[in-house]
Amino acid sequence: MALLEVDNLSKAFGGVMAVQNVSFAVERGLVYSVIGPNGAGKTTLFNLITGVYTPTEGDIRLDGQSIAGAAPHELAVKGMARTFQNLQICMNMTALENVMVGAHLQLDRNLVRSMLRFPGIARRDRELKEEARELMRFVGLQSYWNLDASSMPYGALKRLEIARALAAKPQILFLDEPASGLNSKETAEIDELVRKVADNHVTVVLVEHDMKMVMNISDRILVLDYGKKLTEGSATEVRENPDVIAAYLGSNV
Amino acid sequence: MNALKRHCALMFLAGVLLLLPLALPNNYYYDIAIHMAINAIIVLGLNLLIGFAGQISLGHAGFIGIGAYASAILPTHFGWHPIFAMVAGAAMASAIAAIVARPIFRLKGHYLAMATLGLGIIIAIVIKNEAAYTGGPDGMPVAALGLMGFSISGEKQWYWVLAVMLLFSFWAAQNLIDSPFGRALRALHGSEVAAQVMGVDIVRYKAAIFVLSAFFASLMGSVTAHYVGFVAPNIADFFHSIELMIMVVIGGMASIYGSLIGAVLLTALPQALSTFEGWETVAYGSILLLCMIFMPKGLVPTLAARFGRNDQEEH
C-alpha cells in the first residue's frame, strides 16, 4: 500500500476549479515531485493534502486512513510535516526555538506542570535543545543557532523551515518550493539537503520550479496543468512527454 | 532567557521585595507597593495573553470584578469562608473564560477586541444592576480574609502576602514561557499556520492562556477586595481594562519583567502627578504618548536592546 493516496481530488474557489480530479499515489521512501506552469494548482494541492484547505470532492488517505478535511494539527499527529513557499517562520523567536517548536507533539504540554517546571520538562527541554542544534547542523545552519529568526537571511530561513519540519520526525515531508528565490549555489545545497532527508527514510513530496533540481532528485514526477493531472512518471518519461513540452513551451500544432 | 539569567532575575526581584520595606516610610507607601504588586500580577497574566500569544482582551477588568464580588458576596450573603469564596470566584471567572473562548478565539484583531470588550461590559453591567447582591453603584463592604484562625490585616501583613504571590507568579510565568507550552504560544503569535502544521491546536492554546489570565485576574480581584475591605463596580469597568492594557504596552509586550515595570510605573505615576492639580490627566496622557513615540516596543525591551541584551529574544 502506498503511503499517500490521493483520489479524484477537487477544489473549487467559487467557479474556478483550482484542482480537478487529481489522483496519484506516493510510495514510501520516494522523492515525489509535483510540477506545472504557474497557476497549475500545485500549492493548492499541497494545501489540500496538508489540511490548510478542505477538499470540495475526493479523498486523501495517509497509511490507508482517510485524512480529507482533517485540520493541520491533526495531520501533524499522523506524521505529516511541511514547509511553505512564502516563509512561515516565527520571527518573534530564535532560530533554535523555531526548530524546537517542530518537536511540539513529542513534548509534555501540560499547563500546570509547565508553570511549576517539573523536572521532566526541564530535562527534556535540555535534550531537545541538543537535538535541535543537531538538526540545524544537518541543514547547514550551525552558525545561526543562537540568532533571532528575524535577523537571518532568506536562504537560511528556507533551510530553517526544513529543520523545523524535520524536528517533528515526520514520515512524510511536503516541501513547497524550497529553492524559490535562491541562487544556483543555494539551490544546489537544497538539492543535496533534500536528498539527505530522503536517505533518512523520510518520504518527500516536492513542489518546485527549478527543473534541474526536480529532474535530479525526483523518483517520480506528477505534472499538473490548469488544475488537472497531465501526466505522471519518472524524470525521463516526463521530459519526453509531448503534452508536458506543450504545456511548458506551447505546442506548434 | 537562559536558566542562569532567569534565576538571577528572580533572585534580584526577591531581594528587592525583601529590602523594600526598609525604604517604605509609612503605610501610605506600603499601600502603593501593594497596589503595584496586585497590578503587576494581573498585567503579567494579561501580557501572557497579549504579548506572548498575540491575542487581545479589552474586558479583563470583568474577570477582576468577578473575583472581587465573589469575595464580597459569598461570605456576606451566603456565609461562605472567604478562601472558598476566592476559589469559587476564580473558578467562575475561568469557567466563563473557557466557555466564551471557543467562539471568540475564532475571531482575530479588531473583531476579537470587540468581543472581549463586550464580555467585559456585560460583566460590569451585571455587577452594577444586581444591587440586591452587589450594592449596585454604591458597592459593598468585604469581610476580612482569615486563614486558619489568623486574619490578614494591615498593610504590612498584606505586603508580605503579595510579595510571595508576586514572586510565585513571576517564577511560574517564566517557567511557562520557557516550556513547550510557552513556545507553542509564541509560535502561534509568530505564524498561526506554521504552529498548526507543527501540531499546535491553536484555539485550544489561545483558550488555555485566556483562562489562565482570567484566573490570575479574578484571584487578584479577590485579594484587592479583601485588602481594601470594600468593592465598587468601577473595579470591573472598561477604564480599568484599558489601564491594565496600557501597563502591558508601556512595560513591554512579551516581556515578563516589562509587566512588572509597567505596573509599577503606571501605578506610581498618578500619585506622583497629583501635585499637578487639575493637570494630572494631561500630564499622564502626554507621558504615555511620549513613551509610545520613543519606545514603541515598551520600556523593558527598548532598554534591554539598548544595553545589548534583549530579554525577550533570549528566552
Image (cartoon, grey):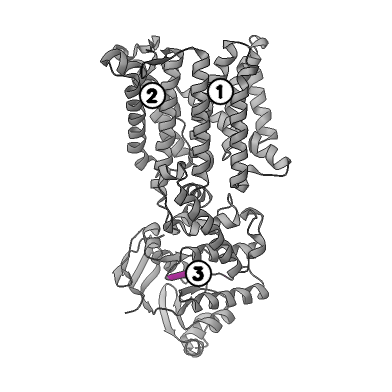
Q: Which element type, helix, strand or loop, lies under badge 2?
A: helix
Q: Is residue A43 left or right of residue A191?
A: left
Q: Which element type, helix, strand or loop, lies under badge 3?
A: strand
- Count of labels in the image: 3
Three-letter amino acid code at the position of disc 3: Leu
In the image, is residue B228 above or below residue B299?
above
What residue range appears in magenta? A172-178
Given the current orientation, which residue lies at the most extreme right position? B307
Rendered location of residue B96, percent (x, y): 34, 33
Tell me the subunit letter for badge 1.
B
Tell me the subunit letter for badge 3.
A
Question: For this rendering, which residue is in front, B207 or A183?
Answer: B207
Q: In which quarter of the image is residue B71?
A: top left
Marks 1 and 3 belong to one chain: no
Residue occupied by mark 3: A175
Residue occupied by mark 1: B36
The residue that appears at 47% across and 74% down in the rendered structure is A204
User: Magenta residues: mostly which secondary structure?
Assistant: strand
How far separated are the C-alphas under marks 1 and 3? 50 Å
How far separated are the C-alphas under marks 1 and 2? 18 Å
Rendered location of residue B293, percent (x, y): 68, 33
The residue that appears at 33% across and 61% down in the rendered structure is A69
Three-letter amino acid code at the position of disc 1: Met
For residue B166, which numbered disc appears in the image? Answer: none
The residue that appears at 45% across and 19% down in the rendered structure is B224
Q: Which element type, helix, strand or loop, lies under badge 1?
A: helix
